Amino acid sequence: LFTRTGMAAAIAATALFTAGSANAEFQERTIRVSNGVSKEHPMGNGLAAMGACTLEKTGGKMKMQPYWDGALGNDLTATQSVRTGSLEMVLTSTAPLTSIVPSFGVFDLPFLFNDEREADQVLDGKVGQWFSDKLPAVGAVNLAWWENGFRHTTNSRHPIAKAEDFEGVKMRVMQNNIFIDTFKELGSNAVPLAFSEIYSALETGTVDGQENPFNNIENMKFYEVQKYLTLTKHAYSPTLVLFSKKIWDGLSPEEQTVLKDCALVGQKEQRKVNREKSEVSLANLKTQGMEVNEITPEEMERLRDKLKVISERHAAAIGPETLDLVFGELKRIRAD
Ligand code: TK8
C-alpha cells in the first residue's frame, strides 16, 4: 500500500514537473555570433539556416544574430569573449586556438587531408567528438564542425611554381606556430597577423602574400591587392561553432538540444554552399584579374617532402595520442 501511494505521488510529481518545464522550455534569447568574414560568405548561409531552425523549433523565441567582419573581435579575441561568457557564439578556425588547445595543431600540419570527404569523416566521427570533448574544460561547447576549407596561396611578387619560389616572400600567416614554421621552412618571412589586418598589410606592402580558401580571398577582396594565386591546397581549416560554456550551463536541456540540432542543419547548408561557391570564387578571382597557376605534380611532391619535417618538429606539442587518433582514422578512411 505504502509503495503504491508512493508511486502515485511520484507520478503526480513527474506530471507537474513536466507541465512546469514545458512553459520554461524556451526563453526569449538572442544568440550573438562573431565572424571574421563578411556576410556574403557561406558562413552567412549556414547561420541563416541555423537561425531559421532555432526560430522554428522554439516558437520564435531563439534568434541568431550574426556580427560580421570581425566587429566583435578576431577569431582569438572573440573566442576569449565566448570563454568568459560575454559573448554567446563564435565561428572560428581551429588554427588561432592552438594556444588554448594544443592538440588542434594536428589540423595545421601541411597536407593532412587530401579532400573534403576525409575532413568530413574525421571531424563528424569519433575523432571530431574527441576534440570537441576538450572544449568544455576551456569554457566552450563545440556545437558542430563547419568548414573554412582548403587553403591556397596568393602574393604580389610572382607565381609560385616550386618550393623555392617562397624564398624571400613576406607571408602573412595565422597566429599559429605550425603555420609560422611551415612558411619559415620554405624560406618566407612569416608574419603572424589577425585576419582583419590582412588587407591593409597587403595593401601597404607590410607583407607580399597570404594564404586562405578561395571564398575568403574573394570575400575579403584580396584580389584588389594580390596578383598571383597558386593552387597549393596545403592545409584544410576546420571551423568550430563555439558556444559559451558559461551561458550554455544556464540554458534548459531543450534549448541545448535545439542549438545542437540546428548547428547541424547549419552545417549541411554551410558546407554545401562553401563547396559550390568555392569554384565560383576561383572563377571570379580570375575575372578580377588574378593570374592563377597550378604547381606540377613533381614540384608538389618536392613541396610535400620539404615540409615533412614540420610534422616531426611539432609532434610533441600536438601530442602522440592526438596524432595516433587522427592518422589512425585517416588510414582507416583511406583503406575504404
Ligand atoms: C575567419 C578566419 C580566417 C582564417 C585566417 O575569421 O585567419 O586566415 O582563415 O578565415 O577563420
Image (cartoon, rainbow, N blue to C red):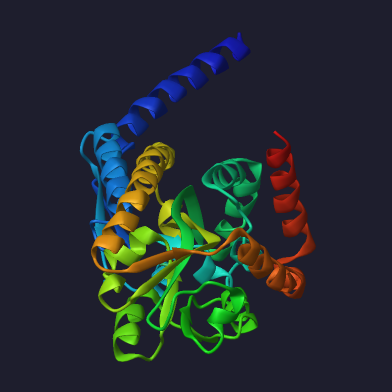
Residue found at the far left of this picture? 60
Q: Quadrant of the C terminus?
A: top right
**Quadrant where ligand 1 appears:** bottom left
Task: In the rendered view, tell whether residue 4 sits above or below residue 255.
Answer: above
Q: Position of residue 221 (x, y in %)?
A: 26, 70
Relative to the observer, which residue lies in front, 11 or 35?
Answer: 35
Q: Position of residue 115 (x, y in %)?
A: 55, 48
Whether residue 255 is visible here, answered yes or no, is: no
Relative to the observer, which residue lies in front, 92 or 21?
Answer: 92
Taking the spot 70% from the left edge, 73% from the top edge, the residue there is 306
Q: Position of residue 297 (x, y in %)?
A: 61, 59
Q: Position of residue 165 (x, y in %)?
A: 54, 80
The quarter holding residue 196 reads bottom left
Taking the spot 31% from the left edge, 59% from the top edge, the residue there is 33
The quarter holding residue 15 reads top left
Would residue 190 appear left or right of 304 to someone viewing this image? left
How many badges with numbers are in the image?
0
Relative to the observer, which residue lies in front, 237 or 155?
Answer: 155
Would residue 183 appear left or right of 328 to someone viewing this image? left
Whether residue 91 is visible here, answered yes or no, is: yes
Residue found at the far top of this picture? 1
Would residue 305 appear left or right of 179 to someone viewing this image? right
Task: In the rendered view, tell whether residue 285 sits above or below residue 201.
Answer: above
Q: Quadrant of the N terminus?
A: top right
Taking the spot 33% from the left edge, 77% from the top edge, the residue there is 226
